[in-house]
Amino acid sequence: MTAVTPARASSTPARVFSERNQGTTVQNLPLSHLSIEVGHFYMDDLENGEEPIRRQFERVKPWLDAAMATVVCGEEKPRVSTCFLVDDYFQRWPDASRIMERLLRLARESGVEIDYVARESSCARRLDGFGVAELVARRILEEPEPEYSTGGRPPTAHTGWLSNGRPPREATVLNVMEAHDWEAGQEYGKRNHSIFLDVELWKDRAEPGADEEEVLSQRLYSCPFLAAVWQLVRLGLLRKDGAPALEVTDWDGHWSDEWTQFPDIVKVRPQAKPFYAYRSLSIMPQHFLGIEHAVRTIIDHVLLDQPVVESLLLRAQDKKIFLPSAVADRISHHFLEGGQ
Amino acid sequence: MARPAAPGQRHENSDPPDKHRPQVVLGAVTTGLLNTSEPLPMEAARQALALLPGVSPDWRRHPIEQVVSPDLFFGLDCKLAVRSGAQPRAIGTARARAVLTAGHVLQGSASVAVVLDASKRRLPWAHYAARTGTVEAINKADPADLVTGFLHARAGNTLLDLGKTGSYVMSLLDRVPQVDRQARLKTQTRRLLWAAQLVPGTEPEAQVEAGDDGVFRVRMAIAPQLLPTFVDFCEVLALHDWLLAALKNAFDRSARRGRRAEDEIDPALTYLGHIWNPTAHLSSQEMRSLWQALEDEAQLTWEWQSTLTRVRDKVTLLTRKAIEETLHKESV
């Protein structure tokens, strides 16, 4: 055995040579304090007449004003941007320009200014073909099983499902006299009682044995999974090579008729505050609550790149802005009442 | 209007400081040969070690090429070994990375920081996901006891096993297209265990022990800011321990009956002979001094040089023998 105490560091001569090429340098993004998503529609809602759209925006408006009053901004002047996610992933019609013009007009007439428009399809795959959703998929860590997770378990979800615990199961009945042959599901992080949730992240539609590229191109992501991508993008946490995974493009003054030709995120109002923000708020109808529960579960299991997380925490600290360390705590919702 | 803090939150700009900071960091470095016929050139190595989409590995060319993968995380909920009292249960994530040196020597380096007595029960997962590379222990334990317990624990199916984590990361490299899975040199995987007690303001103090099981164990008391350089130190030590063992094994095999000596020696000389350079990537003065102190006693570099000399002498003798045999044949 060798026991050593190295010499004091104070005699260190200055170093002449150093080399460490950082593979990735994290960009500092312009940030708003709050990003507000002002409503959400399925694609068929956008096709079904103006009245329902107008009604939702009118109901969003007072909560938008309330949200402005809750901005956490340290000693800075509050910066808030609004955004809208178009649901073009699961179905789309070829009259994108008409839909966009109507949507923005109805929002404006209801007193809701939309600063940025993004497409749900981009959360799966960018206009340039890069698979954004896989950035999240490959960073998902399944919650370790209590007591028996000693470090050798592969880190990612392979099945396309993610849960917050252990599913209910039929117990093997060894002794016929034992009455219970069913075990309840269990939420690992429960407090007294469980709310077990199992979320479908994607469906693989490629033939068995297909290569990885083929599998990914055929993969159909679920709505909560894409919504989780969307939240992480808004929070500036999802990056490719240090830059935002989805970047903002200025609007060139006209909308294409094809959704597939839209930029990933379009800046509609030139004077808008930055798209990315320390926090996000989504205002949407009540029936999205289940989806957002799933979104939160997904986000709780995404392990983000430390340099990105730290760069945001340092910025916030510097500007004296409180920023919760758990990402899901930076996200809030307001659900509009149902039945309308 | 706008307020510095959200309702119900303290007027602070970050979460409340963790109840405790980590007092102990545990780690394991598994070292082996990349399963490839020839060393990977730099470009291929950088592609192979891009284990996460969206981030690229770190790398350096001088004096020896080295590529370091991004960190991967592994979920943990298991017991920590201790010498006395109940084993604390720890929950959180381990951090692991792959390190490829000279395009050929692959290491899986895993570690976890331990916060003791952090909570009374397992918390919602978001809590742990926000503290990557850290486990929080339910119930108390003595940090020194944890260090000893980890370094000398027998394997158990509920005990932390970071060696397995490192091996898993290495296995990821078997599946990348840059690796042809046709290694030409026979080597064995070796493991190094390390444990550091974090003591703010302390002078670094280390003990290195070569166990009879062939495992190097390093324990250290260290100031928290020096931890990353200490991890580098352990990876460097593990690499050189492996190099030495691999060269010696090749030499031993070359002397065995029924083997052609050159089949064992040639690949060892070709692929390993040039890699030895322990201080190449030790960036801090503290760790260079530590290596120097280790050299004074363990003399690993002397051992390497003398082994290398024996191998080369053997090659010279074999060559002379071959020449003499040829001359003999010609004269007959």
Image (cartoon, helix red, strand yellow):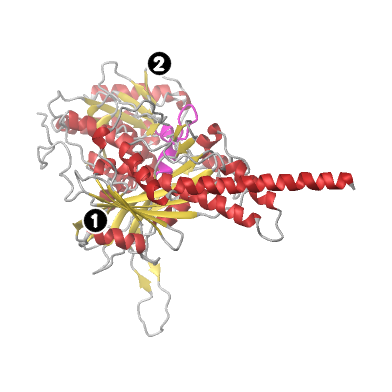
Nearest to the observer: residue B185 or residue A190? B185
Q: Is residue A139 magenta?
A: yes
Residue at screen point 14% across, 24% down: A76
Task: Residue under label 1, please give it.
Answer: B123
Residue at screen point 59% across, 49% down: B310
Tell me the quadrant of the picture where the N terminus of chain A can be found. bottom left
Query: Chain ID for label 1?
Result: B
Query: What range of the chain is rendered magenta?
Result: A120-140
Residue A116 in sight from this viewpoint: yes
Residue A325, compared with residue A260, is above or below; it is: below
Residue type, numbered disc 1: Leu
Image position, residue B172 (x, y; %): 51, 48
Image position, residue B54 (x, y; %): 43, 34
Q: Residues within 10 Å of mark 2 (few under 14, many from 20)?
A: few
Nearer mark to the viewer, of 1 and 2: 1
The disc at residue A127 is none
Nearest to the observer: residue A204 or residue B73? B73
Task: Residue under label 2, please give it.
Answer: A254
* Image-based side of B229 in relation to B102, left or right: left
Image quarter of residue B210: bottom left
In space, the residues marked 1 and 2 are separated at their CA atoms by 50 Å
Image quarter of residue A24: top left
- Give SS at disc 2: loop
Tell me the quadrant of the picture where the C terminus of chain A can be found. top left
Residue type, numbered disc 2: His
